[in-house]
Image (cartoon, rainbow, N blue to C red):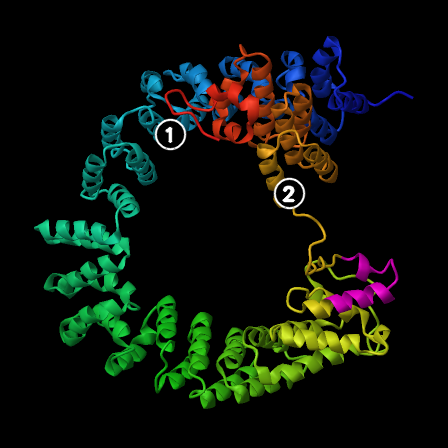
Amino acid sequence: MGWAPEERLAFTLILLDHGIPLSLDWRGRLLPELFRTPMPEKERKRLGERALLHAPLLADGIPSVPMDSSGFMDWLMKAPESAAYEIMLGIAFDSRIPAARRGKVVLRMIRAWGERSADDLISLARPGQSPEILRSLFAGLRTFAKPRHAAALLSADPGNSRGLEGLWLEAYSSCLDSVGRIGLMERTMQVGNRGLLQRMGRNAWEEGSQVALLRLFWEWTDERTAAIWQAGYDVLSDLLPPAEVVAGLKQRFDLETTPEGRFFRVEQARRLRSEESLDLYCEWLASPEGLTHPQSGTLAAILFQEERARPAFNIWWSKRDSLRPDQIASAAICLAPVDPSAREFVWEILPQQSPPAQQAWILHLSQDPQAGDAARCAALVRDPTASAQVRKVGAVGLVRGLPESLPQFKDVFQDLLATPGMEPEAARQMVLGGIHFGEMETRNWVRSEVEALPDSHPLRPRLASAIARARTSSPQEVEQPSDLASVQQGLLLPLADLEPSLLPPVEGKESTLPGCEGFFRNLRILGAHGLEVDSRLAEWMASRSHPERLHPDRLWLLSLKDSVLPEASRVAMEFLTRFESPRSWRLTAPLPTPPPLGWNLEPDPNVLFNSLAESALGSVGSESFEQTLESSRARFPHDRRAFDISGWWALSQGRFDDARHFFRLSSRRSGLLPVTQREPRLGLAACDELQDPSSSTLEDHLRLYDSRKLLSSRLVGDARARLSGHLEEPGEEPLSQ
């Protein structure tokens, strides 16, 4: 029986993994066979990822693979530069290939290989080029464009082409000096793209003349187009303190000579939403011009929670006889916490407001409950004409008035229980609030009312869950003994009363285990009491003379509570392990990882490798250090750091073959991303340079991946002296160790 095609390819890749050379003919045929041979796509993808590790060796076969082969383009996009660059460059310029595919190749090349790709692909920027290719080219050049690319980009100006102009402007601005960028941003204003202006402004600030740029940004704030002045303030808010931004706005406000101009500046102050801009906003509202402006009531409506706005609204309230209803309402709700007459007026006009406004007002008033609020909130909950959300918020206002509102609270809650369809969400809010805000007597009363409901009552499940939630967020110490007793009684439930479940619950819905809903809620409540009650429960369980009689379903639920009841959870897991059948779902179902022990039995890999790296810089041929490196490779065979450090150590000792071997092993453990392949590739390039000083591999790698600091931190001894010329940028001082 012969091998399946994927098996033969897998065996060949295993040979390569072990350093066994292939014939030239087979190296040229491996990739074509991989992508031409019929096989499951999952297998093709797995083999392709393995072949990426040997892509430079297999590069001769890449031209023979048809571009439309299944999975080939995805593989090529991941291949290293040495294997894929020329092929991908040919694809980018091949007019016979669809533009969408060429565009993906262009973007991949620029993002992966930076300036080299930008120089080779810039000739694609020409009039009449496909939008898909231009979009990818401009997107990549936003980061890698240089002044030498400016002429080509200018010739490819897309004009008003929607979707391309913004990318082109950003790419082109990267080629310009500060003066040129300012001129380009002035042109960009015509586009009216706020996000584009922000990005260009921030980029220009990092490299340009800040005085000229500040002048330009302030000029943006004078434009009447919203996108432009908003971009101006966005950039200024990033660069300057809020006080300086508002000072500049105030200066422009004072220079305006028309009501329209001053209102325009007020709109800007409103958008800034800072404390400094609020003063200008309120100053205008309190002025005669603000009082008479037709939109001042709407502008003031958002300020009802701002204490700094109360002086301005005091002026409005004193002149309320001459104001419009919307202005009076804005002033009243802002002053309601401090002015009884304003508060009374708010309650009078509340039914006339929109439901969202009613909700916001009630919540605002409930933060500081006062006499009479409870009766009005109770009336809202009972009002059949009010929306469900308003009645729910009315219940919130009622519970926040506890304990003073207790009589109204009890009456309304009993009415809601008596008429389940009246407002179920309001009843739930009253349970939550009654337990959270109420005193012990109120908490007990709410619990007794809910527990007295028959099982058939439609609100019982929802309210019982609300009790558990509320008591979990606000546990009381006096309730701890009864909560502990509830859990203990649940564990002691006789198996005859509730047979253990034969099937596990759906993952994530453990509380649905038959007969355990109430016990699960009791565990949540008990966990809120803290570690003291956890220790007491664990001691009680450990002291049981017949732990095998504890209910297994409930032990399993307790074992899941390792974060809130850690000791009891471990005891439950021990009992399950001891008394359950090995095939029981309570042992095979997902269990939490046991908490770590108080002492460390295993070395921390990070500490180990940091120590090894430091030792490699200071050791000079120590035999014990060599043994430590060998042990680290055996102890952590899948961690690339063990092989990287071994490679640098061998290189420092002049054992270049050993160094290459270790760096190749590290590369196989480093994944496919260039950032994780950087160190082993750097080590291999250093070996090339030391053995052949005429090689340019190392300098190319350093320039492309900016690895000089990494190289400097790894080299010691004679190797550092021989490669010292590569440790600094041209024109810079040499890096010291």
Image quarter of residue 575: bottom right
Residue lying at the far right of the rendered structure: 1
Residue 123 forms part of the magenta stretch: no
The circle drawn on residue 331 is none
* In-image side of 726 versus 158 (left or right): right
Tag 2 residue: 608
The residue carrying pointer 1 sits among few (fewer than 14), some (14 to 19) or many (20 or more) residues within 10 Å by Cα, namely many
Tag 2 secondary structure? helix
| Near-viewer residue (660 or 103) | 660
Q: Which residues are magenta?
A: 570-589
How far across and how far down the image is residue 374, in percent? Answer: 40, 84
Q: Is residue 11 above or below residue 239?
A: above
Q: Quadrant of residue 571?
A: bottom right
Which residue type does callout 1 highlight? Leu
Can you identify the residue that label 1 sits on?
Answer: 167
CA neighbours of label 2 inside 10 A, class few (<14), some (14 to 19), many (20+): few
Q: Is residue 597 left or right of residue 222?
A: right
The amino acid type found where label 2 is placed reads Leu
**Foreground: 271 or 332?**
271
Q: Residue placed at 55% from the left, 27% from the top?
A: 715
